[in-house]
Amino acid sequence: MSGALLEIRDVCKVFDRGKSSEVVAAHHIDLTLRHGECIAVVGESGCGKSTLAKLITAVERPDSGQIVFGGEDITALRGAALRQKRQQMQMVFQQPMSAISPRMTIGRFMKVPLENFRVVEKREMEAEVDRLLDMVQLPASYKSKLPHEVSGGELQRVMIARAMAGRPALLICDEATSALDVAVQQDIVGLIQRLQRETGVACIFITHDLSLVRQVSQRVVVMYRGRVVEEMPSDSIVSRSLHPYTKLLISSVFTVNCDQSAVPDVRPEDARVKKTADACPFYGRCPRGTAACGEAAVALHAVPGDAAHRVACPVVLKELNV
Ligand SMILES: Nc1ncnc2c1ncn2[C@@H]1O[C@H](COP(=O)(O)OP(=O)(O)O)[C@@H](O)[C@H]1O
Ligand SMILES: [Mg+2]
């Protein structure tokens, strides 16, 4: 199927931390995900990745803007209508152990969504659990195991199988590989790729680790302080990224392959720097920043000749004559 599965339109979310302190977790976010597409969302801790996932699944409500899923505006959905939509979008988190009761068998755990969503007839339930476990390459004998009897990677497979039980159109993996060691991370990434191919599920792969991005996703979205600062095809992130913040992220991951002379010398945030609300959020740390960066509003613009590549850096956009 082609066309947009998810459209995030001009979404803003500010958290009030009391005593006139607030956190801008999403600032005018515009993002489209096609059916069956996988995008990676990257950025350092606290930049708003999980908030974005919560806004999509309506765990958090936007202050303004719209979330359109499957052609329907779900921003104001409540109750049964919202639960029905949520079946279509499932999340997998970093800590599988905290998502399952230690005394619940994996088989029982897998049946919960099958019962809730009435995916199959009661008599087909066992076979469906077997099928889902098989889909993530776990034997049916795992149904009788307790969470502590399987490895972290296996338990994450169970989470993914359970997330797939309601036949979702969208799987959101929020740091789903972050607690696993490197070899197991690769297994999980391979599994997500295969599920995408075999079921056509779209995926939002949230990570602070850039090294997995090219493998798992077609497109990458780079966030900084609640903004999307760059969006581009994943396979060219090392060679063609333009935003100084993206370059900083890359330099911290691909230290071997990356031309270090091209890495900007990023300084700590300069507390004296004054920024307007819509100015570049990276200005206080950016080695390329000019006074204008702190004043002018900045938004994503397409790179000329490459509609799939958008960047929000005043300096870069000026150089590109955008
Ligand atoms: N419920 C909340 N109340 C107040 N602040 C929050 C809440 N949820 C997230 N935040 C803040 O919003 C910012 C973005 O958080 P989050 O989306 O969890 O970032 P990430 O997932 O990228 O690490 C952080 O500064 C975080 O402290
Ligand atoms: Mg998070």
Image: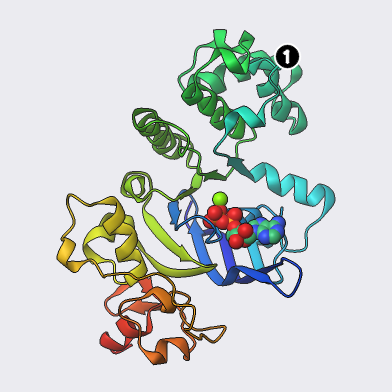
Residue 321: x and y in percent read 29, 89
- The answer to whether residue 297 shows anywhere in this view is yes
Q: Which residue is outermost to the right?
A: 79
Q: Secondary structure at mark 1?
A: helix
Q: Quadrant of residue 69?
A: bottom right
Q: Is residue 72 above or below residue 297?
A: above
Residue depicted at x 39% and y 38%: 193
Of 110 and 4, nearer the camera is: 110
Residue 213: x and y in percent read 36, 49
Instruction: Please tell me how many numbered marks the rendered image carries.
Output: 1
Residue 225: x and y in percent read 52, 67
Residue depicted at x 41% and y 87%: 293
Classify mark 1 as within 8 Å of ligand 2 or not, answering yes or no. Answer: no
Of 101 and 272, nearer the camera is: 272
Q: Is residue 188 above or below residue 38?
A: above
State the quadrant of the C terminus.
bottom left
Which residue is tagged 1? 123
Residue depicted at x 35% and y 71%: 267
Going by the numbered disc 1, the residue's amino acid type is Arg
Residue 37: x and y in percent read 44, 51
